[in-house]
Image (cartoon, rainbow, N blue to C red):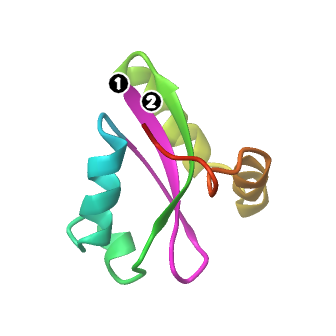
Amino acid sequence: MNYTYILECSDGTYYTGWTIDIKKRLKIHNDGKGAKYTRSRLPVKLAYYETFETKEEAMRREWQIKHMTRKEKEELVINNSLYTQDVS
């Protein structure tokens, strides 16, 4: 499975990425070994994700989300809240 995800950083900003193992990737970010952007904004929490069959689909969606406005990203997060869900 391939995931496109949005992290909420400790400063309230969003980071978007893709991965094949969302739990592992979240841990990597929070261990300070993830993207340069998130290293100075720890801790991060998973705010949103989507699943895809292929890497290409996940990467395409990542690109789309990265080009959204902050308001559009907020709407994705609010309308699909993960704060009470567990990633399996």
x, y (%) of residue 42?
Answer: 39, 79
Structural distance between the alpha carbons of marks 1 and 2: 5 Å
Q: Which residue occupies 74% across, 58% down?
A: 74
Q: Is residue 37 above or below residue 80?
A: below
Contact between labelled residues 2 and 1, with CB atoms less than 8 Å apart: yes
Q: What residue lies at 47% left-to-right and 39% top-to-bottom? A: 4
Residue 58 circle label: 2
Measured from the top left, where is residue 72 in percent x and y?
76, 52
Image quadrant occupied by the N terminus: top left
* Residue topped by disc 1: 55
The amino acid marked with disc number 2 is Ala
Residue 19 sits in which quadrant? Answer: top left
Whether residue 28 is situated above or below residue 87 in the rendered picture: below
Residue 88 in picture, x, y percent from top left: 42, 37
Q: Is residue 14 left or right of residue 35?
A: right
Residue 4, magenta (yes or no): yes
- Please report the bounds of the magenta region as a residue range: 1-18
Look at label 1 and name its amino acid.
Answer: Lys
Task: Tell whether position 30 is magenta.
Answer: no
Q: Nearer the viewer, residue 75 or 64?
A: 75
Identify the residue at image location x=49%, y=40%.
62
Q: Residue furthest left?
A: 33
Would residue 70 appear left or right of 1 to someone viewing this image?
right
**Residue at figure coordinates x 51%, y 46% from the top left:** 86
Please, is residue 42 above or below residue 1 in the view? Answer: below
Depth order, front residue of 83/16: 83
Q: Is residue 69 above or below residue 54?
A: below
